[in-house]
Image (cartoon, rainbow, N blue to C red):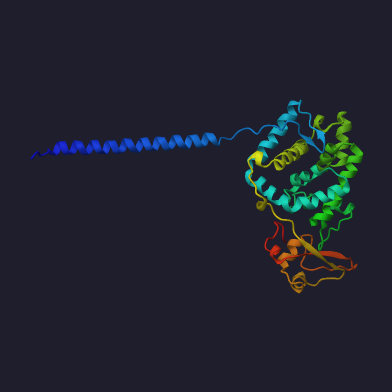
């Protein structure tokens, strides 16, 4: 029988431990290399420019270096702000069909639905300056367009009526400037302000003007949003039909009297106050005085399961 000395046993043990360590290091190195390969495959790359971009059928002058750079910037911002762009795509399923039908009826290019996206993200928002709703209408502009803006009712939150008001503005702007691109720019800075800059600078194209920082990027942002939302998959946004919000199916109840409590009105019609507000975000208080006995069309859900989600602004 052969006996190993304690030293031999120790050396064998150390050799075994060394092999284990080497194997572990090799495994970690292989794992790191695999992770690196994944990182390379998912590298962040510059978004290419579209070949022939246009807004409302009016081509962007892509031979102009500044035009290419400004459009590129907006494409990068909106492509890689994934969480926001995904939400825009979701909301478009609900609101684009309504907006598109009104644009067609008014004779305005469909591209202007992306102006609403740029203005509000298709949400019921209020700007620091007080511009309100999906079309970001100021109070005076809304009232000039015939919208009611009061403590009880603010029709800037009414999708159909606010879209019609925005269309009226854009039609007047197009008649004045004979350009849909300039009409869009005027929506941001006002018709008078844009006319002043065109006259002062002796230009007739949006792309040749020096403007304030917001208006300077405005049309480029709209074109970038149009490009991405029309070709979402090409820009990395994988959406199925079920991912888009469904349009709200609704019916209407005509009301020409005061309402003491909208919650009671809702319950009398078999829905919650929350659902009533969801379908009628333009109702801004808990009651309605209505001294002039004006007739209002109150939207109601056709099916009960549409009353589960409340929009962002639900005061």
Residue drawn at the location 80% of the way across and 57% of the way down: 158
The reply, left or right, for residue 251 in relation to residue 45 is right
Above or below, 195 against 168 in this view is above
Tell me where residue 117 appears, x and y as whole percent.
Answer: 74, 46
Residue drawn at the location 69% of the way across and 60% of the way down: 310
Tell me where residue 152 appears, x and y as whole percent.
Answer: 81, 63
The reply to whether residue 10 is visible in this rendering is yes
| Quarter of image, res 150 | bottom right
Tell me where residue 18 appears, x and y as whole percent.
Answer: 27, 36
The reply, left or right, for residue 263 in relation to residue 6 is right
Residue drawn at the location 84% of the way across and 48% of the way down: 103
For the residue pair 234 and 91, the one nearer the viewer reads as 234
For the residue pair 203 and 27, the one nearer the viewer reads as 27
Q: Check the picture and name the quadrant holding the N terminus.
A: top left
For the residue pair 160 and 177, the one nearer the viewer reads as 160
The reply to whether residue 168 is visible in this rendering is no
């Amino acid at each position: 029988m052969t006996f190993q000395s304690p030293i031999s046993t120790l050396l064998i043990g150390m050799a075994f431990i060394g092999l284990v360590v080497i194997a572990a290091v090799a495994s970690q190195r292989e794992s790191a290399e695999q992770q690196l390969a994944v990182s390379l495959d998912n590298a962040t790359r510059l978004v290419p420019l579209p070949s022939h971009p246009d807004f409302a059928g009016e081509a962007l002058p892509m031979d102009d270096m500044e035009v290419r750079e400004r459009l590129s910037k907006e494409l990068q911002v909106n492509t890689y702000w994934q969480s926001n762009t995904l939400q825009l795509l979701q909301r478009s399923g609900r609101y684009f069909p309504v907006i598109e039908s009104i644009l067609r009826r008014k004779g305005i290019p469909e591209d202007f639905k992306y102006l609403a996206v740029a203005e509000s993200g298709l949400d019921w928002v209020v700007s620091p300056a007080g511009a309100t709703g999906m079309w970001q209408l100021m109070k005076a502009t809304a009232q000039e367009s015939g919208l009611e803006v009061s403590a009880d009712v603010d029709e800037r939150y009414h999708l159909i009526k606010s879209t019609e008001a925005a269309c009226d503005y854009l039609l007047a702007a197009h008649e004045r400037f004979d350009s849909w691109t300039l009409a869009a720019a005027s929506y941001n800075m006002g018709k008078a302000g844009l006319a002043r800059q065109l006259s002062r600078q002796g230009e007739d194209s949006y792309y040749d003007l020096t403007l304030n920082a917001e208006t300077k990027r405005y049309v480029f942002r709209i074109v970038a949003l149009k490009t991405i939302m029309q070709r979402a998959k090409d820009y990395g946004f994988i959406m199925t039909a079920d991912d888009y919000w469904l349009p709200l199916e609704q019916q209407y109840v005509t009301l020409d009297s005061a309402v003491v409590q909208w919650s009671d009105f809702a319950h009398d019609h078999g829905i919650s106050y929350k659902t009533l507000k969801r379908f009628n975000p333009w109702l801004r208080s808990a009651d309605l005085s209505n001294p002039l006995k004006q007739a209002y069309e109150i939207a109601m859900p056709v099916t009960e399961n549409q009353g589960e989600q409340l929009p962002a602004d639900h005061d």
